Amino acid sequence: MKKLSIIFALLLVIPVFAQKSSKKDFSAFEQSLMNDSPAETAAESSDESDTTSVSEKGSSADFERSLMDRPSELNEVFIARDNLLEAIQQKKGDLVRIRIKELEDLNSESVVAIENEEKEYAFFKLRMFKDLLNDLVKRYKTAYEPSKFNENTKHASNSEDALFIVVKKDLDSRDSVHNIYYQYSDQIDRARMSEQEKMKLKLMLLLRSAYSEKDVMKTATNLAKRYVKEYPDDPDSPWIEKSVLGPLERTNIYEYKFKMRKENKEAVVKNKFYTGGFGIRMGVPLYGFGFQFGFNDFYRKDLFEPEIYMIDMEAFLQINRFVLSLGFVNAGLEGVGGFGFDFGYVLYESRYFKVSPFVGAAFSEASFETKEKIPYYGKFKEEIVSDGSGLNTFTLGINGDLKFGTPYFLLSDEKLVSFLLSVKASLSYIDIDSRYSRGNGLVGSISWSLGVFFW
């Protein structure tokens, strides 16, 4: 009987409390937990939403809905995210650093507790540029870790909690045309950082749009080159050179082609040894450095003055190690020259030198200038007279080439052109039997020439 009295008393009390706690007295969040209709909930919570800071709390309805969507197994993560947002709002840099570290420790292959954009928002908001720099370097170095592409990984931000809403609001308000660096460049310049840190931070920020904006790509490329050059002892410099500068340069095909041409040039030159090409030479014989035997009475010195050939010209074709030369040659005997050919063999070739022994033959003729009018010889004074007798010069010699310049040929990345300083030493047997001169013997000579070789 006593129990029935207690139950009856409770039934009388419940309606009284129910009447005092009408639906209007519940908050929008409490109503959402009671599963009120969306229209009713929105109408009853309109006054409260007007007084809520959108920049910090977002839409109360969205926020409350996100609380309902939170996976229960991520409660620790969401508590840490709420703590981070509170630290950001309080502008406590040291506490923000601690909260971010707590969230990073909660990251795993199955859960992403904090997004890069959320950390970046905190660093920009509180002007924590050194922390931003360290985070960006770490982010880019680990950009291709397999865990980042796991489709089964849960992202806490997908629940659209308060931190997500605030960060999204900030991202939507950013300048979508210009790189974010330009929005904060003045603040970065005034930050308590070394010039090296400022330069690296600028590079890391520009990198995000370097592949989509040509001007930014050019600026980032030049900045990376400068950084690697000025700070080679920085532990990050090898990584910047390989993983930042390298891809940027490869993006600019034109500049990358010329860079690779330069880097590969020595290998190209080395692979071209003994392969062949085409060239020309032009020079003069050095008469005073030669010798001759058997030409003491070669011509009448009282009637003639030998014409001096001052130029040798030849074109040569090299196929593998074999060289064929054609041109006007001077064997070293004054007054004698003619058209000839040589057949040579490249005995040695290096980056700067080439040595080619050869054998040759020529159709030489003797040319003289008459000292006065001579009957049967020349009709006029100082007339040039010449005469030859066929294939009459046979030569054994050696060519030495100094390649004092070897650039690429035009825009090619395979063809080369070398500028040559050539010295030729030869021993020739000459046999001339003509109207104006007669004799045979050996002539040793040295000549030099300038040339160009396309190979």
Image: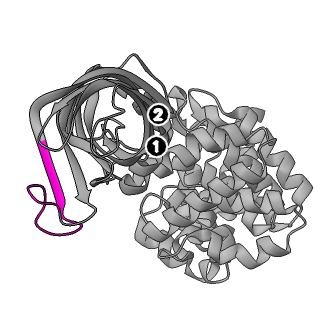
Is residue 255 found left or right of 337 in the rendered image?
A: right
Which labelled disc corresponds to residue 176? none
Viewer-nearest residue: 268 or 96:
268
Please say whether residue 357 is visible from this viewpoint.
yes
Query: Residue visible at 55% across and 80% down?
Result: 46
Label 2 crowd bin: few (<14), some (14–19), many (20+), radius 10 Å:
some
Classify mark 1: helix, strand or loop. Answer: strand
Viewer-nearest residue: 46 or 188:
188
Note whether 105 is above or below 21 in the view shown: above
Q: Which residue is mark 1?
A: 286
Residue 381: % across, % down? 21, 69
Q: Which residue is mark 2?
A: 290
Is residue 258 found left or right of 223 in the rendered image?
A: left
Residue 288: % across, % down? 50, 42
Is residue 296 found left or right of 430 in the rendered image?
A: right
For marks 1 and 2, give the CA distance: 7 Å
Please say whether residue 81 is visible from this viewpoint.
no
Locate the C terminus and report the quarter of the image it occupies: top left
In this picture the colour scheme is: one colour
Q: Which residues are magenta?
A: 374-387
Amino acid marked by disc 1: Leu
Residue 150: % across, % down? 46, 29
Amino acid marked by disc 2: Gly
Q: Disc 1, disc 2: CB below 8 Å?
A: yes
